[in-house]
Amino acid sequence: MANRNPEFEEIFSGVRCGTEADTMSLGRQIASKVKSSLILSLEGPLGAGKTCFVKGLANGLGIDCDEVSSPTFTLVHEYTGGRIPLVHFDLYRLESEEELLPLGFEEYLGTPGIVAIEWGGKFPGSLPTGTWRLSFAIDPDGRKIQAALAS
Ligand SMILES: Nc1ncnc2c1ncn2[C@@H]1O[C@H](COP(=O)(O)OP(=O)(O)O)[C@@H](O)[C@H]1O
Ligand SMILES: [Mg+2]
């Protein structure tokens, strides 16, 4: 399983990001280690840094991170200009799992590249085994990010 990368296990064993730059840097670091594919569910409250982390992923793949914003209205953005593709979902506004179908969710999960799913924890049953579920928490020292591998 591509996601079972010991380097990720170490990085995700619990990280504190004091600043926005640290959160972006974490994304960059992860992106640089992905060989062909990685699925990430980004969880936690509004303002916790999920989109900021995706900007870091983009940057690490050589995609202009200013292009990355919360795809609140389109729900999915695909960036193909980098080393491998980056697909960015934001499921915040989704009300039911059935709404994933017209977004091409399943198809994207099967394609090479990084798939980053903000609010993926709303529909845990739709996350494939091996998805890294990253939980972003706001705390007085910045952001704390913890990970668990979906089974
Ligand atoms: N350590 C940090 N990591 C990420 N964002 C931070 C941090 N500290 C402050 N921020 C601020 O919090 C906000 C995070 O926004 P965003 O990444 O859009 O969150 P989300 O996508 O989780 O709603 C930004 O305004 C950012 O400047
Ligand atoms: Mg966001």
Image: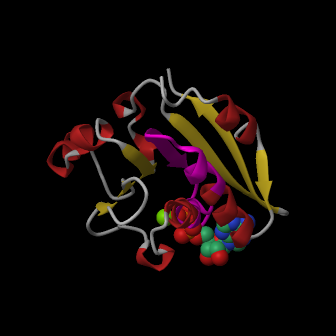
Residue at the extreme left: 102
Residue 7 against residue 66 in the figure, above or below:
above
Task: Name the residue nearer the viewer: 121 or 35.
Answer: 35
Residue 144, horizontal then vertical, whole percent: 75, 52
Task: Name the residue nearer the viewer: 52 or 92.
Answer: 52
| Residue found 34% across the figure and 42% down from its top | 112
Residue 112 against residue 6 in the figure, above or below:
below
Left or right for 52, reference 67: right
What span is colored magenta in the figure? 29-53
Residue 49, horizontal then vertical, whole percent: 61, 63
| Residue found 42% across the figure and 42% down from its top | 122
| Residue found 41% across the figure and 76% down from its top | 67
Left or right for 88, reference 43: left
Magenta-span inclusion, residue 48: yes
Residue 130 against residue 94 in the figure, above or below:
above
| Residue found 70% across the figure and 40% down from its top | 12
Q: Is residue 129 in sight in this rendering?
A: yes
Looking at the rendered structure, the number of numbered marks drawn on it comes to: 0
Left or right for 98, reference 141: left
Magenta-span inclusion, residue 95: no
Residue 80, horizontal then vertical, whole percent: 32, 62
Residue at the extreme right: 141
